[in-house]
Amino acid sequence: MNYEVPKKKITMPGLRKLFRLYSYIKPYKYEYGLGLLFLLGSSSASLAFPKLLGELVDLGNQGKLAQEINRIALILIAVLVGQSVFSYFRVYLFVSVAEKTLADLRQSTFNHLIRLPMKFFQFRRVGELNSRISSDITLLQDALTSTLAEFLRQLIIIIGGVSLMMVTSLKLTLFMLLILPVIMILVVFFGRYIRKLSKEAQKQVADSNTIVEETLQGIQSVKAFTNEYFEMLRYKGKTIEIAETGIKNGKLRGAFSSFTILGLFGAMVAVIWKGSQLLAAGELATGELFSFVIYSMFIGGTIGGMADVFARVQKFIGATEDLLEIFNEPVEEVEEIESLPAEQILHGSIRFNNLSFSYPTRTETEVLHKISVAIKPDTLVALVGPSGAGKSTFVSLLLRLYNPTSGQILFDEKESLSIPISALRSQMAIVPQDIFLFGGTVRENIAYGKTGASDEMIVEAARKANAWEFISQFPEGFETLVGERGTQLSGGQRQRIAIARAVLKDPKILILDEATSSLDSESERLVQDALEKLMKGRTSIVIAHRLSTIRQADNILVMDSGRIIEQGTHEELLLVDNGLYRNLSELQFAG
Ligand SMILES: Nc1ncnc2c1ncn2[C@@H]1O[C@H](COP(=O)(O)OP(=O)(O)O)[C@@H](O)[C@H]1O
Ligand SMILES: [Mg+2]
């Protein structure tokens, strides 16, 4: 279970990725643009504020008429009202765009994820992917709404503030600008380090979530093996790691903020010191110094806030990188199948041509070796052999869940890679060895075989699969909830639901991977009867553990260690001296 997540070195700069993400905003560009306009409005209003206050002070200082003082005060009130209205619309518009963008982003991430080939999922854990969709995207929400707006606001205030200060006093502004860049450089330097740490923290949180998820999913096994304490310890270890990284992060952030405070107040003292000198020399009016100080405070606070935004942007880039890594994986060419064109309809003939295969996670071990075998249309072919021989792998390749390492599979003598993958899969149905039911009702689970099937069709399929008997005995019948992953049903019931699902699909090629293994002999006989009827007019591939179930097969393929070592009918194979089939058969029928 410990598949390593491959780490990819990302060379493209993070900012370019960030902009790629902004393409999701495009459909809402007018709304977004309007939001930016309001942002501009509210920021310029806040810039006008110190200037007007300074004028007010000067008027008082010069002993002007109350009327003139009131006029400026009224303007100030108008600016205030304007600013609050702008702020409302700015926040509202940005949130609205961000929510819509996020919905799109969530959808496209999920849509992409679900179309990725099996190979991809071999390397990833469900918990990890889940946190991509939940927490990473939530992080992006923060970034898309507040962070960018905040950044722009800060930029406007700094640029606008500095320009207005220059108008007020060039000398004093230049003096201030001597101090400012030093602080800025240190801010950037610090921020970079904080980014590294937050990415680490995010990964640790994802790891700890994985533990919780896997433990809860397998809670029955945890309890059965009394591994509660083992799991507690495992989780404890992770949480302590998270806390340690967090604390380290916190120390740095603390240092960061005390550094900014020191720098900013120091700068303030320096500015007022210089300003007083200018005031004394008559180069500056009182009101001007007043508004200058307010501007400096404004800009100082903004620079301080910028560090926070910077850290958030860093986090954002971290989350984006992880997310885009998923987007960079090529998807399978899946498509919705409504009706199949004639040339894509399968007639049920299958041929493996010199096919070899190893799983992407274990490329060094070959699971299937040079398999060549032909399956005639509408026949029943059985696959037998010891566990681990490669039987389930054989059928996975048939479904093109994986592609062969070498050799081909041909359907009706057509190379399988040349047939669209969805067309191919839509004509096959599998009752897999590990049956997976979704948490909904019995009906929903059967209907999964063919979305949009009518109730009659569902009942019919349940009857054919011999599932009707037990379903009708449930008080809620088809509406019975099967529990998470079907845990509230017995193994045999789950199998019959899975068979009904396959029946409903009415495939040309039917695959049963030990589909009757969890049934008692009585139900097995019933299902067997059903399956026999079912197999008419299609090619059936049956993997069976109990040889009694496949005696009537047209061809039996005996597999061992990834090779087909014998084939023939039951009678033919019994004649093979020292043959594997004969041995297995003697073992099973001895009792
Ligand atoms: N998803 C997988 N990734 C890597 N190896 C696998 C995977 N599934 C099965 N294997 C390996 O492939 C071999 C054949 O497995 P399988 O086809 O399931 O055998 P069978 O169905 O005959 O019991 C086994 O050695 C097994 O460990
Ligand atoms: Mg198997």
Image (cartoon, rainbow, N blue to C red):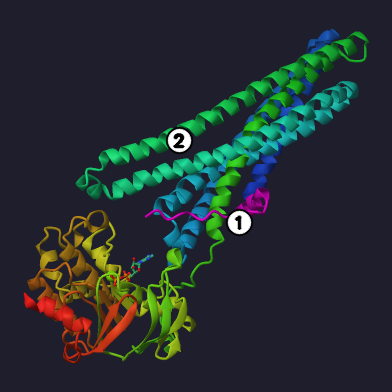
Q: Classify 348 as above or below 560.
A: below
Tell me, yes or no, if residue 68 can be seen here.
no
460 or 569: nearer the viewer: 569
Residue beneath disc 2: 241
Looking at the rendered image, the quarter that the N terminus falls into is bottom left
The image shows residue 481 at horizontal and vertical percentages of: 21, 56
Tell me, yes or no, if residue 173 can be seen here.
yes
Q: Which of the 4 quarters of the picture holds residue 173?
A: top right
Q: Which residues are magenta?
A: 1-30
Q: Classify 281 as above or below 461.
A: above
515 or 95: nearer the viewer: 515
- Comparing marks 2 and 1, which lies closer to the viewer? 2
Q: Is 28 one of the magenta-colored residues? A: yes
Q: Classify 37 as above or below 424.
A: above
Query: What residue is at 45 percent from the left and 44 percent from the top?
Result: 206
Q: Is 228 one of the magenta-colored residues? A: no
Other residues around mark 1 within 10 Å, as few (<14) / some (14–19) / many (≥20) = few
**What is the number of the mark on residue 102?**
none
Q: Which of the 4 quarters of the picture holds residue 414?
A: bottom left
Of callouts 2 and 1, the N-terminal one: 1
Query: What residue is at 66 percent from the left and 28 percent from the top?
Result: 81
Residue beneath disc 1: 27
Other residues around mark 2 within 10 Å, as few (<14) / some (14–19) / many (≥20) = some
Query: What residue is at 87 percent from the left and 26 percent from the top?
Result: 167
Amino acid type at image mark 2 = Glu
Looking at the rendered image, the quarter that the C terminus falls into is bottom left
